[in-house]
Image (cartoon, rainbow, N blue to C red):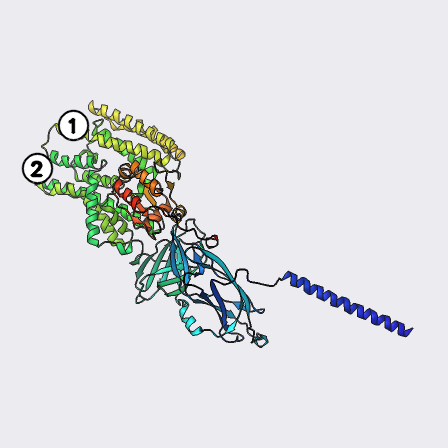
Amino acid sequence: MSRARTFLLSVRQFAAWALALIASVMLAGVAHAQQPERRALYGDQNIAVTLFADGAPVAGKEWMLALRFTPRAHEWHGYWSNPGDAGQGMKLTLDLPAGWQVGEARYPVPLRLTISGLMNHIYEGTYAVLVPVIVPPGADVGALPRITGPITGHVEYLACTDKICVPQDALLDTRLGGDFARWRTQVTPPLAAGVDFAITRSALRLAIPLPASVALNDPHVFISNANLVDYAASQTFRRAGDMLTVEIPLADYRPDTPSAVGGILAFDAGAGVEFGAIPGDVPSGGDLVAGPQGALIPPLWTLVLGALAGGLLLNIMPCVFPILSLKALSLVRAGGSEAHARAEGLAYTAGVVLASLALGGVMLALRAAGEQVGWAFQLQEPGVVVALLVLAAVITANFAGVFELPALPVTGGGEPSGAFATGLLAAFVATPCTGPFMAAALGAALLLPVGQALLLFALLGLGLALPFLLLGFIPALRRMLPRPGPWMERFRRIMAIPMGLTALALVWLTAQVGGRPFALIALLLVLGVMIALSVVGRLQRSGKMAWPAFGLIAAPFLVVAAIALPSTYAAKGKEVAESIHNPAPFSRAALAQARASGKPVFVWFTADWCVTCKVNESVAIEREAVRDAFAAAGVVTMVGDWTVRDEAITAFLTQQGVAGVPLYLWYAPGASAPQQLPQVFTQDLLIDLADQSPGTPLPAPAAAGLD
């Protein structure tokens, strides 16, 4: 009985052991099923990769690994951690023991490759990426096998040519050896000093401590934060002693402010420093090192001449010429006093120059504060447009003899204070009439130091005031003017015609800026003011007190306008004005897509208040011959409407080195940069450009390279 019991016990023990063995095998199988064997899906046929280890790991020390990438042929290239507008960075997985940590990979300075307006951050030829591994104190490094390699892993990356992109991956097994001494000199060294960054409405700004002795032959900042900046946009570099400030336009959408910004400052191809930046103060000013049109800034004396010539041209504009003419005739009416003529000339000049300086200074201050504004920014404000409309209507009525107001500056009252006020008015209304000579000067004013920029604005005002100033100081010029007589009153009424046309143009502009209901309320306000002025004129002619009646009649219209104008205002949308070219509305994404098509691209930037813009569109752009030439060449057309404030357009204008509109850009197929056309041109220029660069579609990048 005892033997049978012993036998049964042995059978039970064997069965329990067998069941445990079977269970353990089954659990192992399940675990294996849950962690399938890793394998390479694509291979590394185009860019081979090898993992090297710098000796054996040491507990508590940093252990350096290196991934060496070797293209099979010279046309293949790899990518930096942030590949740019297209491509894919490296994705590395290492099989490390518990407690071991992978540090931040260290790369060489990448190269820039721009294809159809898209910028990529690439590496050509063989290159190595260093990967530090932090080995914890007390790690049992002796337990790692030394023959087959202590660490394995998997890496995914992208291999591209200028035409195609293919995914690559490889299983990794560390090898001892490798040229770590050379690789350490090739990766970008860290910058020891702290870097500050700030984000404005349109740009990332960096303050990088860098000795003034470090040469910046071809500077560029590669930002590691994805989707933060516009990679292909021009970067502006300024230097003040040992501080380098960099301004990089943001991506199209407005990103959230990151807590840190990293990247590489490249001095030129292959040399640079790696940095990490935290939020802080970024100074402004400094000497321009590189930036939009930076190498093309003309000498200061040419900018001075351009500002003077541009100011002179403004005197023939319909909103300025009547005012200048009547002020000139006021000198004739006032008699031959030399002192009085000089005083009027100086006062008028002071008003013009002060207004030009004020407008330029406000623009520079707003831009320094992060606002995206340009020259004539005041005309993008609907309230200013309505005020100008009322003022133009009042001046027209005065010129036409509806009422008399001797104290009104533009009526030629003959007092220096009146001349000063006239100068303020003339400069204010002349700003949208930017001419071809002012383009370079105003564009350079955005890049020059503040003192030189204000000098250009002052010279612009001096050019505008110069004719009246010369009349005040040169008696021979005054003697050339006709003698006083009844014709002066007739001439004054004739000058009401261009001022009236200016008022009509402002009515149209009001509708463009704020919509038709907004314009109707503005017209109601003008009507009320005109009724009040008409009553004033009748009372004046009968010798009665007139101006209290003006207040009583105009006040209700002013109250209604103050209430109704804000409620009826409708901001202008992105719709494009009617054009025979059927252009697309401008955006950076649309421009990049158009350039990627391989066709010529013509982009023009305009505004409804820009006289030069409208003239060019009438005589050169909106022509059937141009439309036919564009159609034959496959030209893609695009328009940026700057009638109301548009921060994206303002930022783009700044990158092109201009302060406002008009701006005309021609992108030839495959060109890395646009050709900036003159501000005044004929249709023949556009036809010739279309004939010289017919569209030739470029091969589209592979889908893998655009993710």
Q: Is residue 31 shown left or right of residue 90? A: right
Residue 331 at x, y percent in the picture: 13, 36
| Residue 663 in view here | no
Who is closer to the viewer here, 157 or 394?
A: 157
Amino acid under disc 1:
Arg
| Residue at 8% over, 37% down | 479
For the residue labelled by badge 2, is the local secondary structure a helix, a strand or a loop?
helix
How crowded pointer 2 is (Cα within 10 Å; few <14, some 14-19, many 20+) is rated as: few
Residue 107 at x, y percent in the picture: 43, 65
Displayed quadrant of residue 20: bottom right
| Residue 513 in view here | yes
Q: Up-down: is 525 above or below 54?
A: above
Circle 2 sits on which residue? 479
Circle 1 sits on which residue? 490
Distance from Cα at disc 2 to Cα at disc 1: 20 Å
Q: Up-down: is 287 above or below 437?
A: below
